[in-house]
Image (cartoon, rainbow, N blue to C red):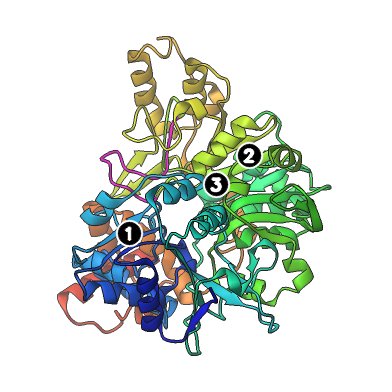
Amino acid sequence: MPTATFDDPVKAAEYIIDQVGCELRVAAAVAIGKPNLLLNALYGLVAADKRLSLEIFSGLTLMKPRFKGDLERRFAGPIVEAMFAGYPELAHARALTEGTLPANIKVHEFFLQAGAWLNNPHVQQEFVSLGYAAVAGHLRRTGINVFAQLVAPDPDGGETLSLSSNPDIALDMADYITRLRKAGLPVVVAGEVNANLPFMPGEAEVSRDGFDVLLTPHAPHFPILSLPREAVPLNAYAIALQVATQIKDGGTLQIGIGSFADALTHALILRHTRNAEFKAMLKALAMPLAVGAELTPFDTGLYACSEMLVDGFLALKRAGILKRRVPLFDSQGQPVPGQALIHAGFFFGHKDFYDALRTMPRDELSEIHMTGISFPNTLFGQEALKRTQRPLARFVNSGMIATLQGAISSDQLADGRVVSGVGGQHDFAVMAQELDDARSIIAIKSTRKAAGRTTSNIVWQYGNATLPRHLRDMVATEYGIADLRGRNDRETISAMLAITDSAFQPGLRQEAIRAGKLPRDFRLPDTATANTGARLLVALAPYRQQGLLPVFPFGCELSDTEQRLIEPLETLKAAGPFGLAMMALRGISTTGEAPGEAAALQRLDLAHGDGLRARVMRALVQGALRS
């Protein structure tokens, strides 16, 4: 059957319903790969006709954040509006936030926008907990009959299309779709063309004939949603500098996205290009290095094999670190022309990241090999090849909570509410155990602060485990790396206590002793008894001042005034009632303005507010700026 082409989303949606019938089970790509116009048209038709039903399965649906307070709205509101300008909101996501989802429509996600849906009963109840590599199998079992995603046209005018940001699940489902078609069962593969999506060649490049429906909306196409960069605090750098010593020259690297990933990328670049300063920072931290630490620049370089393509990999490539290439093979194990510097399943990132992909010469772009998620996340299929390509693999991810016995929680709170999802973290932890010389490294900030109260992120026990303790490997905090693989419980607990903030070591030690997991005479080594934020600040603040540990190591979309506001607003967010009172008092009583104070107040629209609420907020901001 020839591909049906449309420029009207509603007509395309009507055609899909005609092909598969009244019960639509739609798999939509994660993150930026969603065909928003087509999904909204399907939603509108089903919501208006109770004879129809629609079940959407997806992940990482992106929504405008809801602000927790007026001050947050004043700062982040304009940034968010600019970020979402021209981006069509997903109708089903809006209905979920408003509690108006029709009874004949269901939405399941396997990965959530972090923290965005904590208090949404429907989303929490319909969440499906899956590792990334298990998603395709789940879709096959549930009988999905519509596959829909955004695709990129060839900017050079070629006839092919690109799965671009999301070959992750699409390629892993290709055999299933072929079987359905051969069996004469209803199935529709639908693409929505968007010229703003970077065109990725290689395995992600597909024929138009592979689509049953193609929607090509009238130009201009909606912009691809981009993330604002996160500020990198010094404690993230303290972790990253140590983790950077565990990345082996000639090895394989997987990283994620966010402030810690930026910190690690920058730390690796420092190790390679500013080696003396890199070593000086480690010496200033005065922490024992984990066994096998490497401090020298990269000679052979790294190859990246990651579920997510992030701009950190492009930065490592520019720095001459990511340069180990591997030969390419097709799904049958036969060699094909070219080499891969990076294998990845999906991408999502910053505007300049998309721009870099769009403008990259085709020969360089062809070394970034977008593929099905089963390739980077598992050893299944072509196992011998994968083992050969992935020596000295280091899979580096972040967690929220670690227990003293080495379990990690990264996706869910102790009360059962889902923060995000497992994603590929479990896939990589398992693979680290299966590869001979691989390691899984989980980065955990030792403490968190909210409402004026500091609590430990290393605890005795926790109500959720994304990685159970039998997968324990390496855990890194600001205070060192605990190498847990193969260690007994006593050794594990001892190592975890050594990287815990000192304020919480005595209580945790006692819990372990009460449980019979430590001897009563257990004592920490002297090197682990001064784990304080103040010591980290003394060690690393000079390098921040010298520009070696920048707040935004890879640029920033924020103005100078907005950047200046980040730390004071974070201070206010973490403060309790007493701290807020003292901050307001400082704002009222101290004389003289902080640098940039007038511009900061103007940016928050607090320069001339006369109401009581505005005056209090102005005093708080002034106090925080002057601290």
Is 412 in the magenta? yes
Instruction: Decide which of 328, 75 is in the foreground and name it.
Output: 328
Residue 538's disc is 3
Task: Tell me which numbered mark, 3 or 1, is placed earlier along the sequence.
Answer: 1
339 on left or right of 240: right
What residue is rendered at 79% in x and 69% in y? 363
Q: Position of residue 619 (x, y in %)?
A: 27, 70
Secondary structure under badge 1? loop
Mark 1, residue position: 116
Q: Position of residue 538 (x, y in %)?
A: 55, 46
Residue type for callout 3: Val
Magenta stretch, residue numbers: 407-420
What residue is rendered at 41% in x and 27% in y? 505
59 on left or right of 219: left
Disc 3 residue crowd, few under 14, some 14–19, many 20+, Cα 10 Å: few
Mark 2, residue position: 379
Q: Position of residue 223 (x, y in %)?
A: 49, 80
Task: Tell me which numbered mark, 3 or 2, is placed earlier along the sequence.
Answer: 2
What separation in Å lies between label 3 and label 2 (alpha carbons)? 44 Å
